[in-house]
Structure formats: structure tokens, C-alpha cells
Image (tube, rainbow, N blue to C red):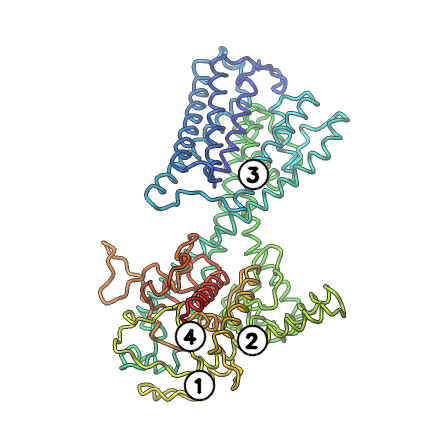
């Protein structure tokens, strides 16, 4: 993707290196802006033109490969060789021009902007070709896929970059002809104009050019804004998922090691009805059922995710700030070096100029006049665009978000109290001001979605954390928002009333199912112990999409476990505090047709969750409900395991006595690669080996970069498809 974006930029600079000679006559005491050009040798121009054609062909080969019009084995060698040829050709030409072609006396001649554009182009060609070599070697080794399938956002960014560069170069040609500028001065003017810096050293003086400036700048600035939006959505959002998944994995391993070393891993041991072990005795002392233990395990994983997300945001801010500072300070030194012979700049002049440029203030009191300075500004501005975009976005997720939250929370405890109560508002304020040190574990304190624009719109069923089982911080507020949306569609119409009634009925059924499932899971007895106490050898310890009937849901009072007599009444009552007891409506019907209807309803519901921003996160009770729909039982310890810390060995062998922490996930996993772990069409889930799992293990549905709603939707669809295929084949 980087090569596909920077390749056209290198070709644009290569065009700038071809259109004008590389040398200018500049005797002492003359003006650099009016220095005449000295024609280049014909062989230099010919080689320069040939390398440009080769580079364009290499770009086309890469695009054809990304659009699956040209095979990987043909396109990649053509692209790599073409870019390397262009890079070495330009490097050789610039080295020759700065050596044997130097005209004496050398102090009366200077290099034109075209010469410096040739250097920038050679550097970019070499960079993107080297990146493609790494990609090619990785693809041959099996680390990367050989077929580059562009997503819509990637295709949009590449096309927008190409069109913006083409628009800039054509505008420079038009206005340079109208104003009598050199073409490369026109390129500099176009970049200053479209980047909204506006130094004022070059400006339109004729009526025709002023008239054309209005539509040209409007279209160009809008196009630049679209490029910025594409950079943010592609680089930030996709990078956020992958980096976040890696940080969650590291945090998970670090937490498991810490709990194991301190002997506090009792909560990770499944509670079974089999012969008690030392670990199970310690867990039973907590007075928990397996369902309650899994809920605590789930909350531990949510805490790991929240910590990793917070850490990722601040690390991203530090990286983007460092890059921006480097671009500012190093760029200042380059500009100072370029302008010192012509204007006598000191380093602070360069710092001031680059800051005015980065912030698009553009006073114009000091501007570059040298060929090296003006050409480098265009190159530097193209680098500053994505760097500043990323910095602003990262600051919006951290510093700006903190200031906004603190301001809002100060208002809630002073002049604008909320409906949540003074005590809760005060806790949220203290938590924000202390950066989470105070009331960091309070379940009644909820973070807002990240982003510069503040809280995103919530849907009625949105569940943004693992602490709120009902899916909303304020049910009344969510209901009011939903009512407002419905009223906007039409007041007192039959369609509106029907939609409201249908939505209320759907939401009521979903809430009843989730709560009744929580009650049933907490009160249902454990399954009898297996003849094989080792959970890794059980035949039914993971989701099976071809069970002849859905899981049974007959609720009754469980008998006390023989090895946990010390379970207190308070622990039992605590498990019911969040549930609505229901006697006559089972969570999952035993009738296959009703079961299929429930699957269809939930598939529709989860499909709507894919549109949520920030991405939907489900509570433990909702996860238990969806897992039970696809055949997994949170109250059945036979399909659960204790998550073990990751131990590295020299030869990569697992430690004796510990289950391997492989990459498999529950029901196919939430892997970061597209298609990883997905079932093939018509493939039976029962053909795969049974894998017990833990919420904090590597097979957890919460692991990986795949969104939770997407993970659940895939399994619900697969479950429904398997049920319908089994019904068609006469197995039900």
C-alpha cells in the first residue's frame, strides 16, 4: 500500500526533473529568480525520459497486480526491476551532472529545481522498490498473501493520490503559462495554494488567472480534504485494529504471568463436579459457580483490553508527536542550509518558517527563494500532510478527549448537573482528572467513545463495555433518542406506530432472552463428570454446528456440589442481582422452528451492530446468550480450560504439563488476517478437533483484530446454515 501511494509521487517528481534543464547561470549580483537555464546534453535528457517511461510501466504493473489483472509472479519482478532501474538511472545522472558536467567557474552556475526533483525521485524509487523486495520475499516464504486485493478504502486512497498529483501538475502548467512563471515555480505555487499555506511570494496578477484561481483552489482543497480523510480512515483505523490486537495479546500474557507468579490464578481454574484438585479447592473457596467464575474471567479480559487500548492511544500519540517534531526540526535545518547562501538564514529562521508552514499560518514574511529550498518545500509538504493528519487524530483520542471530558464533567458537578446523580458525576470527574488512578475499577463509571468530534451516535442496543449488562449507560436516554428518531420519520402515522411497536417488541424479546439465559446459566446444574478428567480430550468441548437439537434449557434448582459446601448465600444472591427471574419462557426453545426464528432475529440484530461506531462491545450475559445459541455453554466446565502463561523455549517446544497455547480460536477464531479460521462452504465443524478455551486464553473470541459483532454474526450464520442443511438432509 505504501508503494502504491509513493510510486505515483516519485513519478510526479520524475516528471518535474524532466521538464526543465538541470543548470542555471547565476553570476554574482544577479537575481536567482531570473537566472537563465543552460540546456542539458541530449543523452542526459534521453536517459531521463527512458527512466520515466520505465517507472510509469512499473507503476502500471503494480496497479494491475493489485486489481488482479496481472499475476503476482509477473507484476512484482517488473515493478521491482523498473523502480530500481529508474532509481539508479537518476542517481547516476545526478552524480554525473554534479561531477564531470560542472561548468567553470562553478560559482557562476547553480542547480535548478529539476535537479533536486531528480534526487527526490531517485530516493523514493529506491525506497518503494526495497519495500516491494521485502514483500516479495515474505510472499515467497508464505508470510504474506501473493494476491494483493485492494479494499475500497485502499483503492480510494490510491486513486485520490494520483488524481490530486495530476491536478496539481496540470494547474501548475496552466498558471505558469498565464503568469509567465517557470513551470517548476508554478508547481511550488500550486502546492502552496492547495495546501492553504498561501505565502504570497507567488500570486495571480492577471484577471484570467484570478478568475480561474477560484474554481481551481476550491476543487483542489476539497480533493486534499478527501485525501486526508482517506489517510485517516485507512492508516489510523486499520492500524489501530492490528496494533491494538498485538498489545492486547502482550497484555494478556503479562497478566497471566503475573497471576501465576503471585499464586492468584484461582479464578482461571474451571469449576467441575469431578474429583477435586488443589486448584479447584482454591476456586471453590470463592463460593462461585462456573458461570460466575467465567463472568469474572470475562471482566478480567475486558480490563486487559481497556488497558491495552489506553496504552495504544498514548503510544500512538508519542510516535506521531516525535515524527512531527522530527519533520519540524530536521526540516528547519534543511531550509536553513538551503537559504543561508541567498538570505543568510540562521537555524531559528528555519524553525520559524517550518512552524508557520506546518500550521498553515503562512505569514509570508520569510519564504524560500533558492531552487533547493522551493523544491524541498514541495517534497517536505507532501510528507507533512499525513504526519500532521495522524498527529491531530491521535491528539483527539487522548489530550483533546481528556480536556473535553474534564470540561463536561466539571459542568455536570457545578452548573449543568446530569440525571445520573451528583455522586456518580463526581466520581467520573475525579477519575478523569487523576487519569484513571481514582475510581478506575468503578463499574458505574463509563468512558465515552474516542475521537476528536466527541461521542459518536449510539444505537439503541449499543453495548460499549463489559460492565453494563443492559447495553446502555442510561436506558431512559437511549429510549428518548430512539423515540426522537422515530418521530423524525413521521408523527402519528401508521407506519411510525407499527415500527415503534415492532422495535419495542423485538427489544423486549431480546432483553428477556438475555436475562433469562443469565438466570438459567447461573442456576442450571453442571453436567456429570466425564470418564476422562482431562478437558482437552473431551469430544464435545467446543461449538458444534451440527447438533441434532439446540441446547436444552430446562431450569431447575441445582443440587449442591459435593466438594463446595462452603458456598455462601450471599454469593448465590449476588449471581441473581442482575437477572430477571422468569418461570414460563425458556431461553432457547426445544422446537427447531422456533429455534431457527430466534437465530434469524439475532442475525438481523447483530448485522445492525456492524454499523456502530465505536465498534459494538457486548456484555458477558449477551456473550453467554449468543454462545449458547451456537452450541456453547458458559455453565459447562467441560468446554473450558485454564489459560496458561506463554513460555518461550529455545526450540519452541511447550513446557511439560501445559497445554499448547496455539493459534486456534473458538469456532474458527478472531484472527487478524482476512479469512483466517473461517469455515469453508459446506465444511462440518465436527471435523475439526475439539478445543477447550478460556476468556483470557489465545482461543478467546475477544482476541484478534476482528470485531465482536462480525465474529458473532459469522457463527450465527454458520449455525443457521448447518441447521437448515441438516433439516434438508432429514437429520432433524
Of marks 2 and 4, the one in the foreground: 4
Q: For mark 3, does the 10 Å Cα neighbourhood hold few (<14), some (14 to 19), or many (20 or more) residues?
A: some
Tell me the quarter of the picture where residue 480 sits.
bottom right
> Up-down: is 10 above or below 475?
above
Residue 119 rendering spot, x and y as whole percentages = 48, 26
Q: For mark 2, does the 10 Å Cα neighbourhood hold few (<14), some (14 to 19), or many (20 or more) residues?
A: some
Residue at horizontal 49 percent and vertical 67 percent from the top: 437
Residue 626 rendering spot, x and y as whole percentages = 47, 70
Mark 2 vs 3: CB contact within 8 A: no
> Up-down: is 197 above or below 409?
above
Residue 39 rendering spot, x and y as whole percentages = 54, 13
Number of the label disc, if any, that sits on residue 161: none
Q: Which residue is mark 2?
A: 511
Instruction: Tell me the CA gap for discs 3 and 1.
Output: 61 Å
Q: Earlier in the sequence, mark 2 or mark 3?
A: 3
Q: Which residue is mark 3?
A: 159
Q: Which residue is mark 4?
A: 549
Q: Earlier in the sequence, mark 3 or mark 1?
A: 3
Q: Which residue is mark 1?
A: 572
Tell me the quarter of the picture where residue 484 sits.
bottom right
Q: Secondary structure at mark 1?
A: helix
Residue at horizontal 36 percent and vertical 88 percent from the top: 560
Amino acid at each position: 500500500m505504501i508503494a502504491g501511494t509513493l510510486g505515483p509521487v516519485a513519478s510526479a517528481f520524475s516528471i518535474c526533473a524532466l521538464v526543465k534543464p538541470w543548470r542555471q547561470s547565476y553570476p554574482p549580483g544577479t537575481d536567482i529568480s531570473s537566472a537563465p537555464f543552460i540546456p542539458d546534453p541530449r543523452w542526459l535528457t534521453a536517459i531521463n525520459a527512458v527512466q520515466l517511461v520505465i517507472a510509469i510501466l512499473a507503476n502500471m504493473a503494480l496497479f494491475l497486480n493489485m486489481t488482479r489483472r496481472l499475476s503476482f509472479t509477473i507484476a512484482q519482478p517488473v515493478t521491482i526491476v523498473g523502480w530500481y532501474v529508474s532509481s539508479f538511472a537518476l542517481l547516476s545522472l545526478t552524480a554525473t551532472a554534479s561531477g564531470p558536467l560542472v561548468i567553470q567557474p562553478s560559482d557562476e552556475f547553480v542547480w535548478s529545481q529539476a535537479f533536486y526533483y531528480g534526487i527526490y525521485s531517485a530516493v523514493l524509487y529506491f525506497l518503494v522498490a526495497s519495500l516491494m523486495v521485502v514483500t516479495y520475499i515474505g510472499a515467497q516464504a508464505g508470510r504474506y498473501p501473493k494476491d494483493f486485493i485492494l479494499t475500497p478504502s485502499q483503492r480510494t486512497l490510491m486513486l485520490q493520490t494520483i488524481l490530486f498529483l495530476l491536478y496539481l501538475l496540470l494547474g501548475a502548467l496552466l498558471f505558469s503559462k498565464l503568469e509567465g512563471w517557470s513551470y517548476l515555480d508554478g508547481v511550488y505555487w500550486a502546492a502552496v495554494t492547495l495546501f492553504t499555506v498561501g505565502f504570497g511570494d507567488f500570486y495571480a496578477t492577471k484577471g484570467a488567472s484570478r478568475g480561474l484561481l477560484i474554481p481551481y483552489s476550491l476543487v483542489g482543497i476539497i480533493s486534499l480534504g478527501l485525501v486526508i480523510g482517506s489517510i485517516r480512515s485507512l492508516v489510523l483505523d486499520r492500524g489501530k485494529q492490528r496494533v491494538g490486537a498485538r498489545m492486547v495479546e502482550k497484555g494478556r500474557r503479562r497478566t497471566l504471568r503475573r497471576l501465576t507468579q503471585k499464586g492468584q490464578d484461582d479464578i482461571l481454574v474451571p469449576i467441575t463436579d469431578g474429583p477435586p484438585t488443589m486448584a479447584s479447592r482454591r476456586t471453590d473457596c470463592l463460593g462461585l459457580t462456573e458461570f460466575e467464575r467465567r463472568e469474572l474471567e470475562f471482566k478480567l479480559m475486558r480490563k486487559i483490553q481497556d488497558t491495552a487500548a489506553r496504552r495504544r492511544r498514548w503510544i500512538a500519540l508519542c510516535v506521531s508527536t516525535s515524527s512531527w517534531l522530527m519533520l519540524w526540526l530536521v526540516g528547519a535545518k534543511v531550509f536553513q542550509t538551503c537559504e543561508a547562501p541567498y538570505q543568510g538564514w540562521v537555524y531559528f529562521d528555519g524553525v520559524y518558517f517550518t512552524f508557520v508552514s506546518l500550521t498553515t499560518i503562512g505569514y509570508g514574511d520569510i519564504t524560500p527563494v533558492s531552487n533547493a529550498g522551493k523544491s524541498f518545500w514541495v517534497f517536505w509538504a507532501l510528507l507533512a500532510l499525513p504526519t500532521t493528519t495522524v498527529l491531530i487524530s491521535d491528539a483527539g483520542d487522548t489530550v483533546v478527549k481528556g480536556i473535553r471530558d474534564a470540561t463536561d464533567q466539571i459542568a455536570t458537578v457545578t452548573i449543568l448537573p446530569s440525571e445520573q446523580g451528583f455522586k456518580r458525576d463526581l466520581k467520573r470527574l475525579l477519575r478523569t482528572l487523576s487519569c484513571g488512578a481514582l475510581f478506575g475499577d468503578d463499574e458505574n463509571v463509563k468512558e465515552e467513545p474516542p475521537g476528536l468530534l466527541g461521542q459518536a451516535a449510539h444505537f439503541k442496543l449499543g453495548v460499549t463495555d463489559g460492565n453494563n449488562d443492559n447495553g446502555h449507560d442510561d436506558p431512559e436516554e437511549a429510549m428518548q433518542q430512539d423515540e426522537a428518531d422515530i418521530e423524525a420519520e413521521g408523527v402519528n402515522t401508521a407506519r411510525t406506530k407499527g415500527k415503534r411497536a415492532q422495535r419495542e417488541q423485538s427489544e423486549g424479546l431480546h432483553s428477556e432472552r438475555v436475562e433469562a439465559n443469565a438466570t438459567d446459566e447461573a442456576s442450571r446444574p453442571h453436567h456429570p463428570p466425564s470418564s476422562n478428567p482431562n478437558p482437552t480430550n473431551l469430544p464435545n468441548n467446543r461449538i458444534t454446528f451440527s447438533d441434532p437439537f439446540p441446547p436444552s434449557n430446562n431450569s431447575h434448582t441445582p443440587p449442591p456440589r459435593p466438594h463446595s459446601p462452603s458456598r455462601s448465600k450471599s454469593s448465590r444472591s449476588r449471581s441473581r442481582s442482575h437477572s430477571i427471574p422468569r418461570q414460563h419462557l425458556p431461553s432457547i426453545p426445544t422446537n427447531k422452528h422456533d429455534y431457527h426464528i430466534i437465530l434469524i432475529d439475532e442475525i438481523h440484530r447483530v448485522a445492525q451492530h456492524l454499523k456502530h461506531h465505536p465498534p459494538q462491545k457486548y456484555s458477558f450475559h449477551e456473550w453467554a446468550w449468543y454462545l449458547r445459541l451456537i452450541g456453547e455453554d458458559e455453565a459447562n466446565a467441560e468446554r473450558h480450560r485454564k489459560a496458561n502463561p506463554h513460555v518461550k523455549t529455545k526450540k519452541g517446544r511447550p513446557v511439560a504439563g501445559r497445554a499448547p497455547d496455539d493459534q486456534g480460536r473458538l469456532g474458527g477464531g478472531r484472527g487478524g488476517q482476512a479469512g483466517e479460521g473461517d469455515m469453508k462452504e459446506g465444511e462440518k465443524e465436527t471435523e475439526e478437533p475439539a478445543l477447550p478455551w478460556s476468556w483470557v486464553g489465545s482461543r478467546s473470541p475477544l482476541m484478534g483484530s476482528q470485531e465482536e459483532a462480525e465474529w458473532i454474526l459469522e457463527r450465527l450464520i454458520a449455525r443457521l446454515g448447518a441447521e437448515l442443511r441438516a433439516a434438508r438432509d432429514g437429520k432433524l
